[in-house]
Image (cartoon, helix red, strand yellow):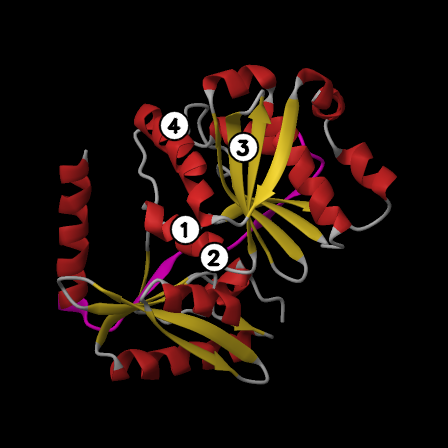
Amino acid sequence: MKVPITQSKEWQKLQDDLGEKSFYKMEDNYQYLAILKSTPVGNYIYCPYGPIANDKAAFKQAIESLKNLAKEQTAVFIRVEPFNREEAKCLPENTKKSTDLNPAETWLLDLTGSDDDLKAKLPSRLLRYYRQAEKKGITIEQSHDVSDIHYLLDLQKALASKKGISTFPEEYLKTELKQPFATLYLLKKDDKIEAAGLVFDDKDIRYNLQGAQTNEGRNLHATGILTIQLILDAKKKALKIFDFWGIAPEGAPKNHPWAGFTNFKKTFGGYEFDHAGTYDIVLKPFKYKFYQLTRKLNRIMRK
């Protein structure tokens, strides 16, 4: 079974540190990390990019196990994110499609093969900027110091104010950086932080989850330079895949919020991988309808 980091024991440790209650189960043919979430309406169980199973029959077994867990926790519904669309076809009839939490579509880059093979996939223009970076006073540092997380957060807040999106709380980001799998990258120009990125590594994959840059950084092509460094460092660690994280779905309009990010990620010689998306297995229909109503009202109030 290919297990994403969000379904690992390491991710459970992160949930524990965040004060979440979680449940980890591993069988011969399936496994899952389930997180108990609370709302004013009631509890629900969430499996980020899970459960993970060897085949469709095992996936159905995992769902039955989750149902038993949900009953023990008096959950209103179970939120799952099947690893692929074939598994999604095995979901029970009382399942509703939900807004995707983790991206359904992502962009991956194969890191296996020679260094020359990898560099041949990378955008030549960005490679040129990367090779010229030091001469221009650009340096890149790695940090595991939680006090440095404000550099990333400050850049994200500036971006969020323009895009109308929200950011993670500072304590959440600090807790992430405390984990052994996390590394913060900082790109500097003349000692000023122009871009930052937070990556997670498991035994095979580097996940490029969060990043941002300044307006000056955009002129310096800071994100491009930093991304090249992230990829080359992942290759040095003998990781097999670089996961750029979410992209806009195929056929999305040009004004899609992720359109720019998607075009950038696709300049790297990778390939698209599609998850099934986020689904809710409804156990208590009346409470679930009330949950959906309150969720919709909250979104309206935030706007």
Q: Closer to the observer: label 2 or label 3?
A: 2
Residue at 18 percent across and 38 percent down: it is 302
Q: Looking at the image, tell me whether mark 2 or mark 3 is earlier in sequence order.
A: 2
Specify the quadrant that holds the C terminus: top left
Are the residues flagged by discs 4 and 3 in contact, CB closer than 8 Å? no
Tell me the element at label 2: loop
- The stretch drawn in magenta includes residue 276: yes
Residue at 45 percent across and 54 percent down: it is 176
Residue in front for this viewpoint, 243 or 179: 179
Image x and y of residue 78, in percent: 32, 69
Are the residues flagged by discs 1 and 4 in contact, CB closer than 8 Å? no
The quarter of the displayed image where residue 18 is located: bottom left
Q: Looking at the image, tell me whether mark 4 or mark 2 is earlier in sequence order.
A: 4
Q: CA distance from mark 2 to mark 1?
A: 6 Å
Image x and y of residue 64, in percent: 40, 81
Name the side, left or right, on which 151 lies relative to 241.
left
> What type is the residue that disc 2 sits on?
Lys
Q: CA distance from mark 1 to mark 4?
A: 19 Å
Residue 178's label in the rendered image is: 2
Judging by the rendered image, the residue that carries numbered circle 3 is 262
Name the side, left or right, on which 41 lies relative to 126.
left
Q: Is residue 298 above or below residue 17?
A: above
Judging by the rendered image, the residue that carries numbered circle 4 is 159
Residue 174's label in the rendered image is: 1
Are the residues flagged by discs 2 and 1 in contact, CB closer than 8 Å? yes
Q: CA distance from mark 4 to mark 3?
A: 16 Å
Q: Looking at the image, tell me whether mark 4 or mark 3 is earlier in sequence order.
A: 4
Q: Looking at the image, tell me whether mark 3 or mark 1 is earlier in sequence order.
A: 1
Residue at 34 percent across and 40 percent down: it is 167
Name the side, left or right, on which 236 lies relative to 227.
right
Q: Which residues are magenta?
A: 266-286
